[in-house]
Amino acid sequence: MSDRKPVIISEEQLEEQRQYIQQIRLMPDAPKSYHVVTYGCQMNAHDSEILAGMLRDMGMEEAADRESADFVLFNTCCVRDNAERRALGNVTWLKEVRKKNPRLMIGVCGCMIQQPGMAEKILKQYRFVDLAFGTANLYRLPELMLKALESEHAVVEVEEQNTIAEGLPVQRLRHDAAYITIMYGCDNYCTYCIVPYVRGRERSREMSAIVAEAEALRDSGVKEIMLLGQNVNSYGRGLSEPCSFAELLQMVEKIDGIERIRFMTSHPKDLSDDLIEAMKHSEKICRHLHLPLQSGSDRILSAMNRHYTSETYLELARKLRREMPDLSLTTDIIVGFPGETEEDFQQTLDVVRKVRYDSAFTFIYSKRSGTAAARMEDQVPDEVVHDRFDRLLKEVQKIGREETSRFEGQTLPVLVERVNREDDSLMTGRTSQNTVVHFPGDCSLIGQIVDVRLDSCKGFYYIGTMTGGNHAAG
Ligand code: SAH
Ligand code: SF4
Ligand code: F3S
């Protein structure tokens, strides 16, 4: 296990990487275009924006798809077996593309590579991969890229460092809303979860760095920011000037021009009354909370190392609803954790019926090697798990539809994100509760917060009508 102390990447180290970027810019045979393929969570999506920022600075253009790029980089996830299989399948498929474009360079990075033994596997079984690196050395992409360009052999680097690198270039996907990672890693060791092993120890960025990033985003026209961490409620532990997540939110709230604040993910065990108060009195913090339940059985929650019971979770959900009646609550649930019985599963359904989530991500338990749960006996047979999964999905969808429809007829502020993908006379945006609304409008509205009446609920989204112009706060 690696040291707990975060390793702050120095200005000299960052400058060294900037010099590699300049060297690559001047190389005549360096790739001219890139395409980053991302799997996994928002934090990975934001890492991809940083990877793209470095590639752009190396002089590459973003290619429309992976077939037309000179360099394809897969930023992988390994939280469940299917995420990993999908990534490896797509990497293999690219081997065929290279037959047509011999210049094509292939890179693989992210959580999957950080697993023990994976780098060796890539070297042996995926010989067509030119470059592979883990999550801890993302900031070293320029150096590794240069090595790969100068070498006949694959360049593979995996370090076990708990790094924090500030000030890396970012090529953002959206102009109106942006991700800010506030902390890295995770120390919770839920027994099913691989994240602590592939993302390192929990470490928080300095509040001043986060606020400066939010201000710069505001200056570039961003209205909504999403603060990211595996467990944002424990933000600030170990900082030179300790600060809580609620305090961080209050600082970000003060930034004029930032109109909406979202965050992900909250661990129920660490959700404080201060946070509820900060949310309740805020004009900017969105009325949406993602609060992973994982299971409704106390026996399973304890085996998962979650540190709460169904009753304390329910009490928290009741308090949240009482303090903020317009809050939307969403969750993650795992079915088929080792030893889960029908009775345990019924307890999960019971919590689902009591909380009435606006939506829920449901997952089939996936055994991850190296985790404590992988060593547990009583793995539940596939057909039993699938049957439970189907029943749970039906229930969460039924409740989700009913809950989503509770806004019908209301007029709510909506941040307009984009033109509707199927009908270009419609615009698509989200309410503070994260509910999707499509309504007639034109693309000049993108990036604005406008009032939209939610006319008819179509299951998980709405068709609406714009009733008011630009809004100050969402
Ligand atoms: N840090 C966040 C979530 C990280 S992973 C949190 O604690 O909520 C996102 C979700 O993937 C988890 O909430 C969990 O529901 C699911 N997940 C994680 N490991 C899994 C596994 N081995 N099998 C199935 N689902 C898993
Ligand atoms: Fe995984 Fe638990 Fe950490 Fe979330 S809190 S990333 S589920 S170990
Ligand atoms: Fe996956 Fe890594 Fe995120 S394992 S869920 S991409 S932290």
Image: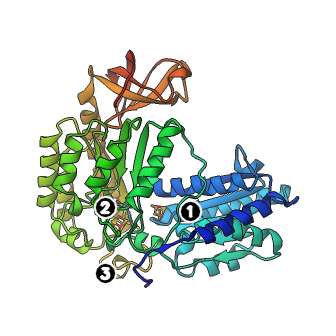
Residue sitting at x 66%, y 66%: 15
Q: Position of residue 157 (x, y in %)?
A: 64, 77
Tell me which label, 3 or 2, sits earlier in the chain.
2
Asked whether 334 or 250 is in front, the reply is 250
Tell me which label, 3 or 1, sits earlier in the chain.
1
Checking the image for residue 335, the label placed there is 2
Circle 2: is it few (<14), some (14-19), or many (20+) Cα within 10 Å? many
Disc 3: which residue: 377
Tell me which label, 1 or 2, sits earlier in the chain.
1
Q: In which quarter of the image is residue 3?
A: bottom left
Checking the image for residue 76, the label placed there is 1
Which residue lies most toward the top here? Answer: 467
Q: Quadrant of residue 467?
A: top left
Secondary structure found at label 1? strand
Residue sitting at x 39%, y 80%: 4
Left or right? Give the position of 245 relative to 416.
left
Q: Position of residue 223 (x, y in %)?
A: 44, 36
